[in-house]
Image (tube, helix red, strand yellow):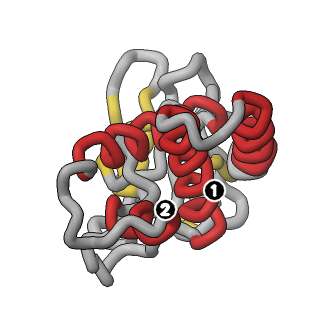
Amino acid sequence: MPRLASVDELKAVLRIPLSESSLDVQLGDLLDEVGDECERITGRTFTEGTFTDEPHPGGCDSIVLKNRPVSTSPAPVVSEVDAFGSTSVLDANEYLVDYAFGIIRLRPGRRFVSGPVGTVLVTYDAGYAASGTGNTAKIAVPPSLSRSAKDLAAARFLKDRGAMEQKDLDAAEERARRFWAGFGY
């Protein structure tokens, strides 16, 4: 479950004292729900993980990975599967990786093999550091994405408590969905 903001960050938005722990599970569930929705809308995974993509049927000199940012360690592993089903792993010096945008480009004059989806496989680690973990080795969730998640979770919390009207919750949900669409493909 993606956690685009921490429970303490959501408490700050709602002006709930950090020492008040009786709502932590409910607030965490709201953040998980909002994170899942964000991933569904964007078609991306935002939390850390190891992924294997079948980016395209081959024949091109670059591919775009589904999840980003891509971790530099371990480096992505790019494999090609030939018509006979044999797999060969490309040497890391045969391609360049744009880690921030998740793009792998082959060196000039080289193209990925052609064939059906699954001809090119990329295994890699990607995603933002989970919010509130203090993991400085990974890129943090963009503040604007975290803010939209907190705003929507807060709106749903207030609606559940009777402190917000349905039309205001609908407006908050529409704002979040429009914003998240910019993080998709």
Q: Give the number of the mark in front: 1 or 2.
A: 2
Q: Quadrant of the C terminus?
A: top right
Task: Decide: few, some or many residues near mark 2? Use Cα within 10 Å; few <14, some 14-19, many ≥20.
Answer: some
Q: Quadrant of residue 37?
A: top right
Q: Quadrant of residue 148?
A: bottom right
Side (left or right) of 62 relative to 80: right
Q: Are marks 1 and 2 in contact (CB under 8 Å)?
A: no
Residue 51 falls left or right of residue 34: left
Q: Secondary structure at mark 1?
A: helix
Q: Which of these two is toward me, 158 or 97?
A: 158
Q: Which quarter of the rendered picture does the N terminus lie within?
A: top left
| Image-based side of 85 in relation to 119, left or right | left
In this view, 15 is above or below 125: below
- Residue at the spot 42% in from the left edge and 57% down from the top edge: 127
Q: Is residue 65 left or right of residue 122?
A: right
- Residue at left offset 71%, top offset 45%: 176
Between 91 and 169, the one lying in front of the other is: 169
Closest to the observer: 12 or 164? Answer: 164
Q: Residue at x 35, y 47 (%)?
A: 27
- Evaluate whether residue 42 shows in this view: yes
Residue at position x 50%, y 27% in the image: 119
Residue that numbered label 1 is attached to:
148
- Marker disc for residue 14: 2
Q: Amino acid at mark 1?
A: Ser
Name the residue furthest bottom: 136
Residue 111 at x, y percent in the picture = 66, 47
Q: Nearer the viewer, residue 101 or 130?
A: 130
